[in-house]
Image: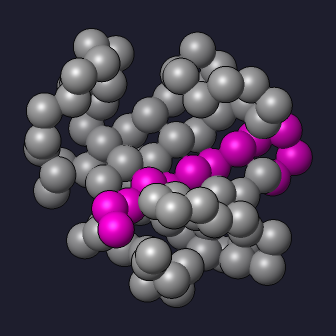
Amino acid sequence: MVAIKDLSIENVHSVYSGKDGKCCCGCAGKHSRNTRFPRPEPKEAYRNNFNDKMVRKVIKIVQDNAGIAEHGDNHWSVVLGERLYIAYFDN
């Protein structure tokens, strides 16, 4: 588990920004990948979505809203208005 304060471009491999209450497959939002983690991606829709600027933006949003953020085994997430932001990391 990565502490929310320790999220960084060095340990977050991808992020998601999408409509809250919808699935996170990408139909109501976008997955962006970190160029530092170029591992193969099995889903065609995610293969070339490298965007370090968006990765940094979502990390900042999640950290700036730590008081309302939630976490799972491999992510931190926050909902702001109707938008869901998720930062994924490896354990």
- Please count the marks in the image: 0
Of residues 72 and 20, the one nearer the viewer is 72
Q: Give the answer, above or below, for where 32 lies relative to 27.
A: below
Q: Position of residue 12 (x, y in %)?
A: 35, 62
Residue 53 seen anywhere in this rendered image of the structure: no
The x, y position of residue 58, in whole percent, is 53, 56
State the residue at coordinates (52%, 41%): 16
- 9 vs 49: above or below: below
Does residue 11 appear in this view?
Answer: yes
Residue 19 shown left or right of residue 47 in the figure: right
Range of residues picked out in magenta: 80-91
Magenta part mainly helix, strand or loop? strand
**Is residue 11 within the magenta segment?**
no
Q: Residue at x 15, y 56 (%)?
A: 36
- Residue at left 17%, top 52%? 37
Q: Which residue, as the protein is rendered here, is positioned at the far right?
A: 81
Q: Residue at x 71, y 65 (%)?
A: 70
Image-based side of 73 in relation to 49, left or right: right
Image location (x, y in percent) of residue 14? 37, 48
Q: Quadrant of residue 91?
A: bottom left
**Direction from residue 7 to residue 21 in the image, left or right:** right
x and y, in percent, of residue 28 in the image: 65, 20
Scheme by which the image is coloured: one colour
> Is residue 87 a member of the stretch shown in magenta?
yes
Quadrant containing the N terminus is bottom left
| Above or below, comparing residue 11 to residue 15 in the picture | below
